[in-house]
Amino acid sequence: MVQNSGFLSIGAQSLEYRFIGPAPDKAPTLVLLHEGLGCAGLWGDFPDRLAQATGCGVFVYSRAGYGQSSPVKLPRPLTYMHDEARDVVPALFDQIGFQRGLLIGHSDGASMAAIYAGTHQDHRLKGLVLMAPHFFTEDMGIAAIAEAKTAYETTDLKQKLARWHKDPDNAFYGWNGAWLDPGFRQWDITEPLAYIRVPILIVQGEDDQYGTVAQIEAAERECYCPVEVALLPGVKHSPQREASEVTVKEISEFAQRALA
């Protein structure tokens, strides 16, 4: 399978990326947006398996502050998800020659995908896959994020993240600091959901520690586009790691329908 990797320049930022499978002029492209502590490498072999299952090209990148990409200035603005959807995603699409495909996001990345689709009428975009998305904050999610801070400061979590991020503090506190800011309690992206004009697949674990089925219900209530749901029993916040086979199957079947 063809793959290449390297760095793209978006504004002043240097972003690491990996591209697997056929180029955008040969097949549709699946663009993956990682979670709040993720990066290109932390997707593991999931992008390769998606490319194999769908026949599409798969593009993954590390946002600024993550992986080997440029660091960001802390604290991050509480609008960081909107900023990424407005400033970075369109520039990335242009740079990679995106012609037709899906946006697939996990956690923070799912929220960014929803914001992008709800604020850009991009006719190249044929569907969204939102894994463990957040559309508003919930007390249990904030509590889990506070627990992550304790773990980062008292266990070997920092050493584990340092394997993937050249500046683990920049990655961790950029995410954690924004979510634990009292002002972030008002964060809510349910409004853009009404403006999404492509089909959506939501994949969520029944035991997700960061969000309840209220997130799914918000999408079903607010969206005018078709919303399909795969609620996975015994799965927490990372369907692509905890139930990889089912998740690849759900996404590839959805991709087939959305790109038909």
Image (tube, rainbow, N blue to C red):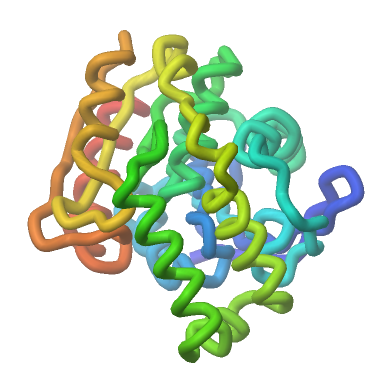
The residue drawn where x is 55% and y is 71% is 41
Front one among 226 and 24: 226
Task: Give the quadrant of residue 162.
Answer: bottom right
Front one among 169 and 232: 169
The residue drawn where x is 47% and y is 25% is 189
In the rendered view of the protein, which quadrant contains the C terminus? top left
The residue drawn where x is 42% and y is 49% is 107
- Percent position of residue 7, x then y: 78, 61
Extreme residue toward the left, this view: 233
Extreme residue toward the front, this view: 182
Q: Is residue 153 left or right of residue 191?
A: right
- Percent position of residue 220, x then y: 23, 20
Front one among 172 and 260: 172
Q: Is residue 10 left or right of residue 175?
A: right
How many numbered marks are there? 0
Q: Is residue 77 left or right of residue 122?
A: right
Task: Give the quadrant of residue 174.
Answer: bottom right
Extreme residue toward the right, this view: 12
The residue drawn where x is 53% and y is 64% is 37
Question: Relative to 90, does residue 48 appear above or below in the rendering?
Answer: below
- Percent position of residue 93, x then y: 67, 36
Question: Relative to 212, does residue 260 appear above or below in the rendering?
Answer: above
- Percent position of residue 114, x then y: 47, 29
Question: Relative to 234, does residue 205 appear above or below in the rendering?
Answer: above
